[in-house]
Amino acid sequence: VPVLLVEAEGLHLRRTLDSGQTFRWRWDTAGGEVTGIVGRSVLRLAQDAAGVWLIAPQSPDARQTVLRYLGVDGHTGVAGIERALARDPVLARILPHTSGIGLLAQDPWEMIISFIISQNNNIPKITRSIASLARTLGDPLDGHTRTSSQQDPVSSYAFPSPERLAAARSQVLRACLLGYRAPYVRAASRLVSSGQLDLAALQRMPEDDARETLRRIPGVGEKVADCILLFGLRRMTAFPVDVWVRRAVERLYFRNRPRTAREIQQFARARFGALAGYAQQHLFVYARGHLRPTAGPGRRGLNGQ
DNA sequence: GGGCAGGTGTAAT
DNA sequence: ATTACACCTGCC
């Protein structure tokens, strides 16, 4: 019997899992159930009018894993966050389209590699790359063997350890569709496996120190560093500025006037403060849904909607 | 088929 | 401190 996760009230599962912060979930064809890898668990979830359900596995253990992962084991629920966000008139206007987005508590190591791979890339390919890395170099889960589930984009394999990734031949990394990012992934893996980069210490650092430390990893620039801070280290003030968020902020807050990434960062910190990370997720999802540049005549800078 | 996609490193102002 | 350019790969 599936277990209802009452703590997840207010969470919109699909919006959350499809909001670009995780690449380890796959919906079934009907869209009713989703399967994903969290740590060494293969989880199956669903959502209906009653709420979010844990379908499998059904151990109390898994229940705790999911709640922590969904970020709903804390004090402030999604509804409370959104009430605060809605004090901003712009966010109040887009929230009906984006309500229910949560910020997941993901593994810092997995986030470092995932978002290095995300640079100049698109979600389907990032997803394939990570699945390929896991299938090639990660431990099989759930009794699967390495030869099974060849086609599964979200294969049942744990994310590879820094050691396994660092030891991989570059040919192997290339075969996982990393392209020119392969050397970045290798360098990051060596930094961590050698102990030069201490992930536990990273967790304890103040945000700016952690950002600076992350920026020293090859392939980690401003945007990727903020993704790691937000999705892996739960620093809710982080505000990753990608092309979509920039588009949204320029259009919704600056009358469509061009702004540099730095200006947008500063604006977000001042405007959203401790909720910047949530604001960013809502703006991102809204932009992808409603601010496609190809949707109208003219290039970037005009129209929208 | 050239251009682009949830950027970054590098070289040149 | 800012700006142009290349870059794996798949998709249009």
Image: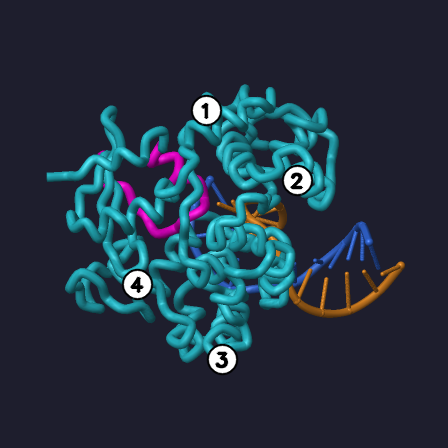
Chain colours: A cyan, B orange, C blue
Q: Which of disc 3 and disc 1 is earlier in sequence?
A: 1
Q: Quadrant of residue A77?
A: top left
Which amino acid lies under the numbered mark 1 shown in the image of this protein? His
Label 4 and label 1: CA atoms lie apart by 33 Å
Which amino acid lies under the numbered mark 4 shown in the image of this protein? Ala
Q: Nearer the viewer, residue A89 or C1?
A: A89
Q: Classify A93 as above or below A283.
A: above
Q: Which residue is mark 4?
A: A158
Determine the residue positioned at 15% across, 47% down. A58
Q: Which residue is mark 2?
A: A269
- Element marked by disc 1: helix
Determine the residue positioned at 22% across, 68% down. A146
Name the chain letter of the residue that bears numbered label 4.
A
Task: Count residues near mark 2 (Cα–Cα under 10 Å), then give few for <14, some for 14-19, many for 20+.
Answer: some
Label 1 and label 3: CA atoms lie apart by 45 Å
Q: Which of disc 2 and disc 1 is earlier in sequence?
A: 1
Q: Which of disc 4 and disc 2 is earlier in sequence?
A: 4
Q: Which residue is mark 1?
A: A97
The extreme front residue here reads: A75
